[in-house]
Image (tube, rainbow, N blue to C red):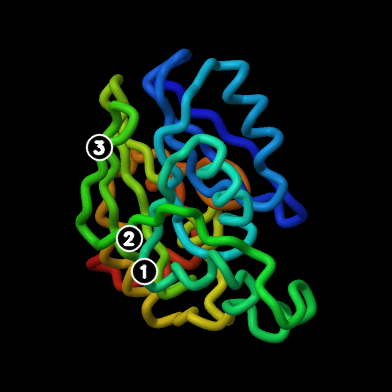
Amino acid sequence: MLVLGFPAGPLQANCYVLARGDGEPCVVVDPGQDAAEPLAAQLDEHRLTPEAVLLTHGHFDHVMSAAKICAEHEIAAHVHPADRYMLADPGAALGPMGKQLFGDGPAGEEPAEVRELADGDVLELAGLRFDVAHTPGHTGGSVLFGVGTEEGGRLLLSGDTLFAGAIGRTDLPGGDHGQMLESLTNRVLPLDDETVVLPGHGPTTTIGRERAGNPFLQELPADAH
């Protein structure tokens, strides 16, 4: 299995590309600000053909290149319906900061084809199986994508729900700290320790490492660990 990742844009949001190998169809996850050019370089280097765009949530630093990439490759973007509005209006979920960044009008664009995700969905894309878990907290439509590897391992594309040593902020419009704690308790902590976490920002980690050292997870009920 081929897993590529790179940070893009001023907020260094991680964009990921997953495929069975070089020369294969692929899935692009969270193509945010300034992601189109480095993504094109990765696709060319590995001879990959995008089959879909998956979005862990709707914040601009994770979605701003989605419409461009979808148009270029004639593919759909997949997003939870609670966050779909952010695709065309990226400042809407940022409160006063959004006004400073984007002004009064939308600076985004919804892809021509959008498919809405639901909790429990199973997506068969590019020869890979993605399990969808709805994890509100960072945003109302945040999701996790779980995918198995041919070698028998397990990957978790966690967006801004879980980072190495931290969790996503919940103080922006649509955020809810109580929901975040529920999502972490019910959807993150039950995962196997060996699960490799590919977060929306920062370095890769594992569930076991976060269970042992992430202060936000250690504050959760003991019976959830």
Residue depicted at 40% across the width and 56% down the height: 114
Spot occupied by residue 108 in the image (x, y as percentages of width and height): 63, 64
Q: Residue 60 at what x, y percent from top left?
A: 62, 62
Q: CA distance from mark 1 to mark 2?
A: 5 Å
Q: Is residue 160 left or right of residue 90?
A: left
**Which class describes the residues within 10 Å of circle 1: few (<14), some (14-19), or many (20+)?**
some
Going by the image, does 18 lie left or right of 132?
Answer: right
Which residue has dot 2 on it?
116
Name the residue that disc number 1 marks: 81
Residue bearing the label numbered 3: 124
- Left or right: residue 36 compared with residue 10: left
Residue at horizontal 29%, vertical 26%? 127
Image quadrant where one finds the N terminus? top left
Against 142, residue 53 (above or below) is above
Q: Earlier in the sequence, mark 3 or mark 1?
A: 1
| Label 1 with label 2: CB-CB less than 8 Å | yes
Task: Tell me if I can see residue 158 in this picture.
Answer: no
Amino acid carrying label 2: it is Glu
